[in-house]
């Protein structure tokens, strides 16, 4: 009789995610994952799968947790405008405070160009985030807090791509004041 596998899969996936986050997909070996997750290879293969399957689960969990957090924060605000301001300020703060960077951005640049499965997952996640952001922008427009002549989807894309540029700037210059100023500039420009 096979022995029952006893471990908390979510906890192990979080540990693996941190390895991928630190070393990147290509820089992470199966031994790195086994060591970090503190399980044997056969348990990993039997329950989660190979490195690629594990990585896909890590990316999905990372995105799901990030979306849950942002949805909760936005839901707490009665003003869509204030919710957007908070999202922008939070992202600027996170860019400065998170040394590891964004796992999503790392994945897009490292793996997505060559891996259709990863690219499709990242595209799906990106669209979910953009749709959520566009809904929040549209609510601000409907409530008279933003210019109604703008396209909510385009505005959401503009906000999101700003975050990527800020991360690039921070990696190169390590200037938290510049990131804060760029976030203030974005807020000023979208709420004219």
Image (spheres, helix red, strand yellow):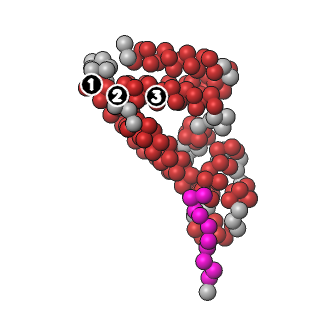
Image location of residue 72, percent across then percent down: 42, 41
Quarter of the figure with residue 11: bottom right
Answer with left or right where residue 103 lies relative to residue 125: right
Residue 139 versus residue 114 in the image, above or below:
above
Q: Could you say whether the residue bearing mark 1 is in a helix, strand or loop?
A: loop
Q: In which quadrant will I find the N terminus?
A: bottom right
Mark number, residue 143: 1
N-terminal label among 3 and 1 = 3
Is 178 magenta? The answer is no
| Cα distance in 3D space between marks 3 and 1 | 17 Å
Discs 2/1, front: 2
Judge by depth and name the residue closer to the eye, 177 or 46.
Answer: 177
Q: Which residue range is magenta in the image?
A: 2-11
Query: Would you say the magenta stretch is mainly helix, strand or loop?
Result: loop
Q: Earlier in the sequence, mark 2 or mark 3?
A: 2
Q: Report which residue position mark 3 lands on.
A: 86
The answer to whether mark 2 and mark 1 are in CB contact below 8 A is: yes
Give the label on residue 79, or none. 2
Task: Say whether residue 184 is visible.
Answer: yes
Tag 2–tag 3 contact (CB < 8 Å): no
| Badge 3: residue crowd in 10 Å (few <14, some 14–19, many ≥20) | some
Which residue appears at 47% of the width and 48% of the height?
Answer: 64
Viewer-closest of 84 and 24: 84
The quadrant in which the C terminus is found is: top left
Vertical comparison of 50 with 152: above or below: below
Structural crowding at the residue carrying mark 2, measured as other residues with C-alpha within 10 Å and reported as few (<14), some (14–19) or many (≥20): some
Q: Position of residue 120 (x, y in %)?
A: 46, 46
Instruction: Look at 51% across and 20% down and name the residue there.
Output: 183
How far from the left and from the top, in percent, is residue 8? 59, 64
Q: Disc 2 and disc 1: Cα gap in Å?
A: 8 Å
């Amino acid at each position: 009789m096979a022995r029952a596998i006893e471990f908390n899969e979510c906890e192990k996936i979080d540990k693996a995610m941190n390895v991928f986050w630190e070393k990147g997909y290509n820089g992470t070996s199966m031994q790195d994952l086994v060591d970090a997750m503190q399980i044997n290879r056969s348990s990993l293969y039997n329950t989660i799968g190979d490195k690629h399957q594990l990585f896909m689960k890590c990316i999905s969990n990372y995105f799901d947790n990030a979306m849950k957090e942002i949805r909760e924060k936005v839901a707490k605000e009665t003003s869509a405008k204030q919710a957007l301001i908070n999202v922008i300020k939070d992202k600027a703060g996170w860019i400065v405070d998170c040394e590891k960077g964004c796992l999503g951005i790392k994945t897009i640049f490292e793996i997505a160009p060559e891996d259709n499965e990863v690219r499709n997952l990242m595209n799906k996640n990106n669209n979910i985030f953009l749709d959520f952001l566009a809904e929040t922008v549209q609510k601000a427009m409907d409530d008279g807090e933003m210019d109604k002549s703008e396209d909510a989807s385009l505005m959401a894309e503009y906000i999101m791509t700003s975050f990527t540029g800020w991360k690039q700037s921070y990696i190169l210059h390590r200037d938290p004041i510049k990131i804060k100023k760029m976030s203030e500039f974005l807020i000023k420009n979208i709420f004219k």
